[in-house]
Amino acid sequence: MRYLTIALSKGRLTELSIDLLEGAGIDCSGLKEKTRKLILTDEKNKIRFFLAKPADVPTYVEYGAADIGIVGKDTLLEEGRDLYEVLNLGFAACRMCVAGPMELEGNMDNLTITRVATKYPEIAKEYFRHKRRESVEIIKLNGSVELAPLVGLSEVIVDLVETGKTLKENDLVILDTIAEITARMIVNRVSMKMESERINRIIVSIRDQIDMKKTQSE
Ligand code: PRP
């Protein structure tokens, strides 16, 4: 039996991803240890794991270097990779939004926006150029995007909003919601065919856990 390889996103999603995999009977103990080792293994189930930057997880899965991945929908929309999105895991819920100063609220349709700052240039491009048919300059930033309208780098931003605290504390508001975001499970297209039995077993087990959590919270 060959090893199945799972790519996990480093950061916010790591802990809950491990919980779901452990719930599916996969031994993730290696992932919890402080180690510089990049690939960890569950020998019994013939599964290997690695942690990668979220933006790289869909790349590993598209090329088949990982059979399965766990990553945010924001990253999937931004990367636009060719793979199967098999499960909405429901956790890490937030929204991809256009946000800006309060003065712009309720006025989006009359505004001429020239510059948009974002960590998500493809999502911003799709929204402004293709959906709104506006020609804007998209400025790629790597974090603290909320700074941009405060210091005059751009009129608005495209960014994730979770609790809304960052916007509120900086006197910014949501101007439009582009997409609802949660963590997703993704699968390589060839692996889905070649290893369908093992992969489906994992999918079903994780889906059952999600359904159970939903029932418990109702
Ligand atoms: C994310 C996002 C917002 C913030 C939203 O940034 O880009 O800045 O969290 O969360 P809130 O609505 O709960 O305030 P992150 O913390 O990942 O840091 P970054 O800005 O440096 O990317």
Image (cartoon, rainbow, N blue to C red):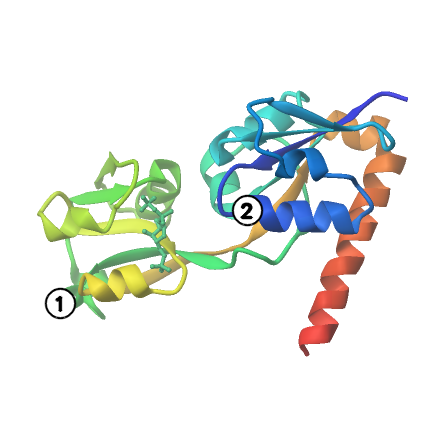
Residue 209: image location, x then y, percent: 76, 59
- Residue 140 occupies which quadrant of the picture? top left
Q: Which residue is mark 1?
A: 103
Mark toward the viewer: 1 or 2: 2
How far separated are the C-alphas under marks 1 and 2? 34 Å
Look at 86% across and 36% down and name the residue there.
198
In this rendering, the answer to whether 192 lies above or below 18 is above
Look at 64% across and 46% down and name the residue there.
17
Tell me the amino acid under the disc marked 2: Leu
Q: Is residue 19 left or right of residue 158?
A: right
Residue 118: image location, x then y, percent: 29, 42
Quarter placement of the C terminus: bottom right
Residue 144: image location, x then y, percent: 26, 45
- Helix, strand or loop at mark 1: helix
Q: Which one is earlier in the sequence, the residue at label 1 or at label 2?
A: 2
Quarter placement of the N terminus: top right
- Helix, strand or loop at mark 2: loop
Camera-nearest residue between 118 and 80: 118
Q: Which residue is mark 2?
A: 13
Mark 2 is surrounded, within 10 Å at the Cα level, by few (under 14), some (14 to 19) or many (20 or more) other residues, namely some
